[in-house]
Amino acid sequence: MARVHGENSLKLFKICIFSFIIEVIGLALIGFMILRTIYLYKNYVAPQAQNLKLIHSISKNVSEEQSISALFVLSTEEEFLPEYSEREVELHYSIIEDLNVLEKRMKGRTELYQTFHDIDSLCSDILSKIEIAMTLRKNGFKEAAERYISKDLQNSFFQVNGYLVSITEQINADMESVQRRMMYYTRISNTVVAVDISILILTVLCLIIVCVNLTDKLEMNKDKLQEEVSKKTEKIIAQAKHLQYIQEQTILGMANIIESRDSETGEHVMRTSQYVEVLANAALEYGYLPEILTPHYIDILKRVAPMHDIGKIAVSDAILKKPAKLTTEEFEKIKIHTTVAERIIFTVLGKIETEEYVKTAIDVAKSHHERWDGNGYPNHLKGEAIPLSARIMAIADVFDALVSERCYKKAVPPEEAFEIISESSGTHFDPILVDLFLKKKDEVLKIMESK
């Protein structure tokens, strides 16, 4: 059944391709017809329309010249004669100018060459006759001027108009021929459009059938594909979690080994990580620095907290395990563990972890001994210049150090440790974080008791 569907779909797809080719050819033909029609309009219809406009202007000026010359001869008011004479000359030269433009525009029409030559001759003749009629009128021979105007000059004007009518008829004939060709192209275009629409409908129907067949086939394989994708996704997620677990356990193991050199077990690493998580969540609920403190940030902080003393690998056992108070020189040596940690973390994790993860780990390891009042180390950072992660780590680290027994001191009771943390607010620690830590006293005590 699936094979039959596939063969039918292939045949229909071939029909669609063939129809598409015909559609493209049809569109190309329509485009050609449109371009051809535009060409005819620009090169024939529009120029001829302009020519007709010129002829209309010439004919109008000829009629007006005829009227002005008659007014000049027949007028009884002598003061208007100069005005009539000036207007007649203006009209005559306007006619000559328009005729020259028209002749240039129709230069390719050799059959009209004689017509334009005759019109030029007539215009020259008209100008001469008008000058004669005006001279007769000025010299008092009004009746002779009237006869001259009514006979010879009138015939010349009629001849000019006759030539103009002849040119107009030829232009109209040309335009009718062009219009017939344009109508022919339009009919072809309409026919091609009708065919293209029919083929388009057929193509759409074929595509719908193909899509239905493909949809049926996809539905048949849908469950199988979903199952395969789910299995692979679960496998990838499990592998990613396993790799992350291995990485975290490796980091935790390294931290435990380092802490064990300081007469401490891995419990310090686990407890401080839990204190960090409790304090960070309390700050999140309080809304402290929301642009930094997010659930994602807390997750990273919890994972990097075990590395806070990883730099102690560079400090000798004689200093770490010394049961007495450290000398100034020894304390300076132990302080280098913060800067050494930065290099270790960047070297080990720089190419396998995200930039945010590496930065947070370095901030915790390098700056958790900085003090709020600026008297810490290694860079004497002060106040909010200390990274938030390091400020949180500082409280967790100091509290656990206070309540834990070390080779050089006894454990401090929890209540006394809380009191020391409170007294250090604003000097050693961030005041807001101290308040939040003290409010979580019960949770902190549960972590202590679970060791």
Image: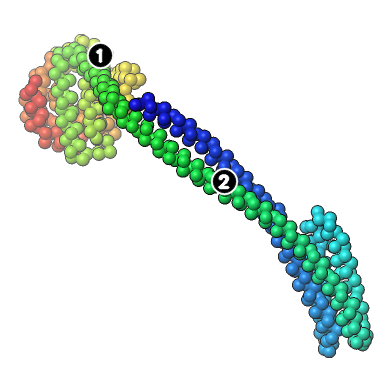
> Where is the C terminus found, in terms of image quarters?
top left
Q: Select label 2 or label 1 by which is in front.
A: 2
Q: Residues within 10 Å of mark 2 (few under 14, many from 20)?
A: some
Q: Amino acid at mark 1?
A: Ile
**Numbered disc 1: secondary structure:** helix
The percent coordinates of residue 92 (x first, y second) are: 83, 71
- Counting every numbered tag in the picture gives 2
Q: Looking at this view, is 216 or 147 the one in front?
A: 216
Q: What percent of the width, then of the height, locates residue 231?
A: 26, 22
Residue placed under numbered mark 2 in the picture: 192
Residue at left 81%, top 60%? 103
Residue 131 seen in the figure = no
The answer for how far apart the CA atoms under marks 2 and 1 are is 86 Å
Q: Residue at 78% across / 67% down in the picture?
A: 165
Location of residue 425 in the rendering, given as x and y in whole percent from the top left corner: 17, 35
Counting residues from the N terminus, which is met first, the one under dot 2 or under dot 1?
2
Which label belongs to residue 132?
none
Label placed on residue 313 = 1
Residue 399's spot in the image, x, y percent? 14, 26
Q: Is residue 13 left or right of residue 144?
A: left
Q: Nearer the viewer, residue 403 or 392?
A: 392
> What residue is rendered at 18% in x and 24% in y?
273
Residue 136 visible in the shown view: yes
